Amino acid sequence: MAKIYSKIAIFSFLVFSPLLSYAATLSVSPATGSYEVGNKVVVKVLAASNVSFNAVSGLLSFPSSLFAVESVSKTNSILNFWVTPPTASKTLGTVKFEGVAMNGFHGSVGTVVTVNLRAIKAGSAKLSFQSGQILANDGQGTDITGNLNGATYSIKEASVKPSVPVVPEPEEEVVPEVVQPAPSLKAPEIMLGSKYGASAIVGTSEHDKAQVLITFVAEDGAKVFITGASDDEGGFIVLIPNSLKQGKYEVTAVMIKADKANTETSNVIKINVGNIFTDISKEVWGLIALLILLILYLLIRIYFHLRRDKDKDKNIDQEKNKKGMLNYQLEKAEEDVHKSFKALEADVSDRARGIVNPVERDNIEALKKDIESTEQVIIKEIKDLEK
């Protein structure tokens, strides 16, 4: 049994290692801090990943009773085109942002937006993400979102400072805010077509050698962004990503020139994507394949146990002894089956802790139930042979 346990561990590592290594993090910096009423608090939203990504979105909340938002800055952001420019709601206590790094971001960590807050009341303040998403720069818009890390700040009443000569603080260097031009170019026209035999978004425009941003919006509002480029005549073809879940999508396109001049949004087309099988990721398919292989292994092992025992005992005259030996081997096989399935269930549970996508977690839970049901079927078959 040690051999099969090691095989399960190796196979599971190969199945899950891509998922674990590609997880990205959206976080608030600094994560902790102590301030006084009246202090300015500079908060940065950071995106970190060990693979290139090109789209980041999020909704950050803060207690509006303890903080007043003074401004939200895009200065030094790793994103260079904003689908939804960073905006703050003072009444709701939220900051919303949605942007794209058109050529992808290849560093380990970068600033998405900077939020300038002012402490207005003493208390304990928690900043957290109501939602957040990071998409890989892989041409598929793969969701690599991992942890969404907030922050906790302590705000105290302002202390009374002794009267001392005020030394002026050195002036900070002001970095000019990069302003994204308003859409001024003619919008492209898009339609559903094909490329290399696969479904694709086909577009025409007046803008040659421009970058193209394709937006897929699901019925629940979830978005996937895919980038491309137009040719010398202004045309472009962008494959529909395999990462899209089953369902209906509205698709639009925007084009951005080298000087950041951009077009109006294209016409909207509607597409249907996938089926129930396309929603199962390669990680879950790997677990299903592992389960099938394990079941085949156990069935073959049981078969050879029974065959070997039958050959050894065929010359034994006493049927009672032969049946007793057979029952003993069946009991041992039953123990092996039970141990193997327990190991598989434990491995699936351990790996499921690293999966944050709700659809994937539902698939994992369904798979665990299938594992339990399969074990019961095999155990029942062994018990029937014992009779």
Image: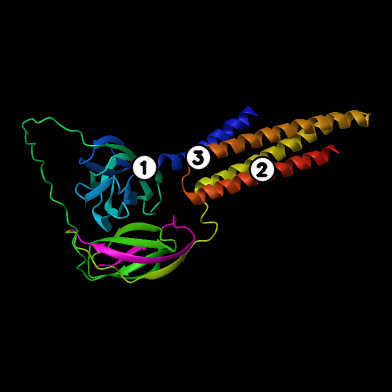
- Ranked by sequence position, the earlier of labels 3 and 2 is 3
Residue at 56% over, 44% down: 287
Q: Dot 2, how many residues are within 10 Å of its Cα: few (below 14), some (14-19), or many (20+)? A: few
Q: Please tell me whether residue 315 belongs to the stretch shown in magenta.
A: no
Residue at 28% over, 61% down: 212
Reading the image, the residue beneath label 2 is 372
Q: From where the camera sits, is residue 107 visible?
A: no
C-beta proximity under 8 Å, tags 3 and 2: no
Reading the image, the residue beneath label 3 is 353
- Ranked by sequence position, the earlier of labels 3 and 1 is 1
Q: Dot 1, how many residues are within 10 Å of its Cα: few (below 14), some (14-19), or many (20+)? A: many
- Left or right relative to 180: residue 296: right
Quadrant of the rendering where the N terminus is positioned: top right
- State the separation of the CA atoms marked 3 and 1: 16 Å
- Give the amino acid type for the residue marked by disc 1 in the picture: Thr
- State the separation of the CA atoms marked 3 and 2: 19 Å
Residue at 62% over, 32% down: 4
Measuring from the top left, give residue 306's x and y in whole percent. 79, 35
